[in-house]
Image (cartoon, rainbow, N blue to C red):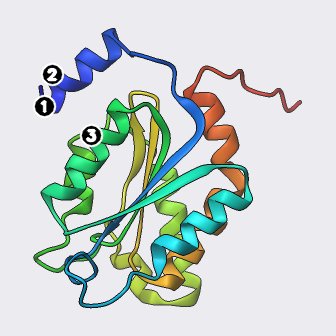
Amino acid sequence: MTGHGERAHRAENPGSAPSLRRALIVVASNRAAAGVYDDTTGPVIRDWLAARGWEPSVVVVPDGEPVGAALREAVEGALALVVTTGGTGASPTDRTPEQTRAVLDFEVPGLAEEIRRVGAVTTPLAVLSRGLSGVAGRTLIVNLPGSSGGVRDGLSVLDGVLDHLVDQIHGGDHARHD
């Protein structure tokens, strides 16, 4: 199944409970996937997550459908988190948002908006990112830009909300703030 039918099937049959601390980093880069250069953003995200008690792994894939395949595999594997890096710009090969949207059950637009807002403090180019954030099954998916600065900005935003959001996705109650 694909698309909306797949989402409906997951909603009715959520499968096994996800490991709340397993994460996948998907690096979307044609050149890094081809070995033209080493990816530098995936290790930054991996180290950031590991320092916070997550069990992250990194996969480097070409832009486009390979990103979608990695996302679907992570959701089917019941990972709690997928962070993508790269493929969010406006070039003809940047297809990460389209691949992400195809697997999401719903978007969390404020998260993506805040990542762009924080990035724009440093560079006006941050507003060109088309990255999305949302939930597929019980997996949080966050698209970050492919630049090291964009990754740092995105992680700074996630730092304040990641644990709460993952808890909410898995049925946690809202804390009262009177």
Query: Toward the viewer: 135 or 60?
Result: 60
Location of residue 172 with respect to 98 vertically, above or below: above
Q: Position of residue 45 (x, y in %)?
A: 55, 67
Image quarter hosting the N terminus = top left
* Tag shown at residue 10: none
* Tag shown at residue 72: 3
The local crowd at label 3, few if under 14, some if 14 to 19, many if 20 or more residues have their Cα within 10 Å, is many
Q: CA distance from mark 1 to mark 2?
A: 6 Å
Residue 130 falls in image quadrant: bottom left
Q: Secondary structure at mark 1?
A: loop
Query: Toward the viewer: 150 or 47?
Result: 47
The local crowd at label 2, few if under 14, some if 14 to 19, many if 20 or more residues have their Cα within 10 Å, is few
Number of marks: 3
Q: Residue at x 36, y 41 (%)?
A: 74
Identify the mark nearer the N-term, 2 or 3: 2
Query: Toward the viewer: 160 or 35?
Result: 35
- Residue ID for mark 1: 2
Identify the mark nearer the N-term, 3 or 1: 1
Do the CB atoms of the residues marked 2 and 3 lie less than 8 Å apart? Answer: no
Q: Position of residue 58 (x, y in %)?
A: 43, 61
Q: Secondary structure at mark 2?
A: helix
Q: Position of residue 73 (x, y in %)?
A: 29, 40
Location of residue 29 with respect to 19 vertically, above or below: below
- Residue ID for mark 2: 5
